[in-house]
Image (cartoon, grey):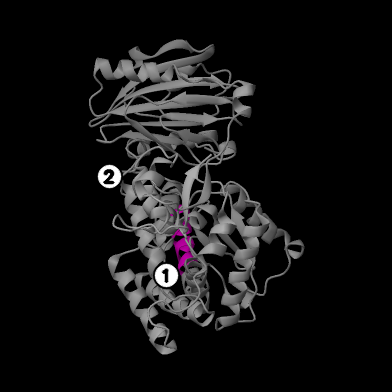
Amino acid sequence: MREAERIGRKGGGRRVASALACLLILSACASLEGGDRTTAEIEPAAMRAAPADLMTPAQRREHERLVASYGGAYDDPELKALIQQVVERLVAASERPDLKYRVTVLNSPAINAFALPDGSLYVTRGLLSLANDTSELSSVLSHEMAHVIARHASIREDQVRQAVLVSRVISNVVNDPNLGALAMQKSRMSLASFSRGQELEADAIGVGIAARAGFDPYGASRFLTDMGRQAALKASGVGAGSTASTSPDMDFLSSHPATPERISIAIANARQYSVASGAGTTGGERDRTAYLTAIDGMVYGDDPKEGFVRGRKFFHPKLGFTFVAPEGFTLENTSQAVLGATASGAEALRLDAVRVGADQSLGQYLASGWIEGVEVNSVESLSVNGFMAATAVARGEQWSFRMFAIRFGSDVYRLIFAARDLTPDLDKKFRAAAETFRRVANDEAETVRPLRLRVVSVGIGDTVEKFAARMQVPDRPLERFLILNGLDRESKLKYGEKVKIVAE
């Protein structure tokens, strides 16, 4: 939940009226405002990158907007140097060795990599945490370069221009700006991913680039496999049953689905290069040691300054508040809101922030119509740990809502609980959870430490179960440990080898 991107400011709350139900059951309609560049949207002719200080004003604005939307840049010179080395090798082995790239590691747990027309290449630390060696990293980067070489971006640019024209016709001729905006949103969502054929073509070209650069061509199939397992884990968590990503940042998992067919094709592509080189099925560099050394200590998951989740507790030291969800809830922090749900999906919650004028009471705000079905006689004013607040109930055909508006500083925080059946006992539980919203003490905020990837050595007698027990994650530590290290349940750990765990 980022300070600069909290949903609902200056009218944004009205959009919740039609979408609140899907948001609360975590089928959030993905906004592509800050995350639609999930693959390399690069025009090859414009790819001769200039140093950062030679960016045009427009390029710098785009760079700063994008970096801010992903939580800022992650500063780790050693890690960035390794990525730059991989990029340079890939570029030299590609069909366009004259192109140059600038690398920025984004401080985001999202799994993503993409490039801009000026040669800026971006990789999130979320993606870096999932990879396990230099060949897996090279597979992602070479895939993005392949979209450029195959001119997929320029083809899609024509489609984007056509979508803009359609939205303008609807807005101007039909005189319905809302309908025009909706048409554009749907067009952008459909354009967010390259076609199946383009993805497979980029896979094939990317494997070739990586192999010619001296990397293990099987890195792509390994990373795709782990990416698919991570997507399945995410889908079975907070977003279980979702039809869209819960995160406003469209990520690599959304635009690059790791289907069994795609993985098998990647293996077939890699086999051609392995046979050609006479290296068998493991030819090429993997360099797990160098890669793990570079990511050792990297922040994992939420950055505390953007707020973070520990079990049922959400803590935001920068904004200065904390909140504890009801028993049985799993939370997810996104840049727009904190979302939560129970395993059954019968209960959900959303915490976000809006601006409410001082001339409007919180009770009036709750009854103002930003969500339909508010029972006006249920509106009541109250105090939550010394803060002015109001609460109300709203009922729809399938969901009922217990809503709270809490004035905290210059913002009003909306804490919205949803239930299929809002019983008196459940309503009491929601009220008790709202009472946990409180200010964070200065000394409490100063003790906050992020979770990090820790690279450790396997000792005698160590098992995956023992390492899973050391994982400081909210749920399913064994599954997360296996996926994080590219292992399956039957994998045997070898004495002295390095593995990743998550710990403070």
Q: Which is in the foreground here, disc 1 or disc 2?
A: 1
Q: Look at the image and say whether residue 221 sits in the magenta stretch.
A: no
**Residue denoted by label 2:** 241
Would residue 311 be found to the left or right of residue 117 on screen?
A: left
Q: Look at the image and say whether residue 166 sits in the magenta stretch.
A: yes
Give the amino acid type for the residue marked by disc 2 in the picture: Gly
Question: Can I make out residue 120 in this image?
Answer: no
- Residue 444, percent from left and from top: 59, 24
Looking at the image, is 379 positioned above or below residue 124?
A: above
In terms of image quadrants, where is residue 25? Answer: top left
**Residue denoted by label 1:** 220
Magenta region = 159-172
- Residue 218, percent from left and from top: 41, 73
- Residue 89, percent from left and from top: 59, 76
Of 8 and 217, nearer the camera is 217
- Categorize mark 1 by other alpha carbons within 10 Å: few (<14), some (14-19), many (20+): many
Looking at the image, is 185 positioned above or below residue 103?
A: above
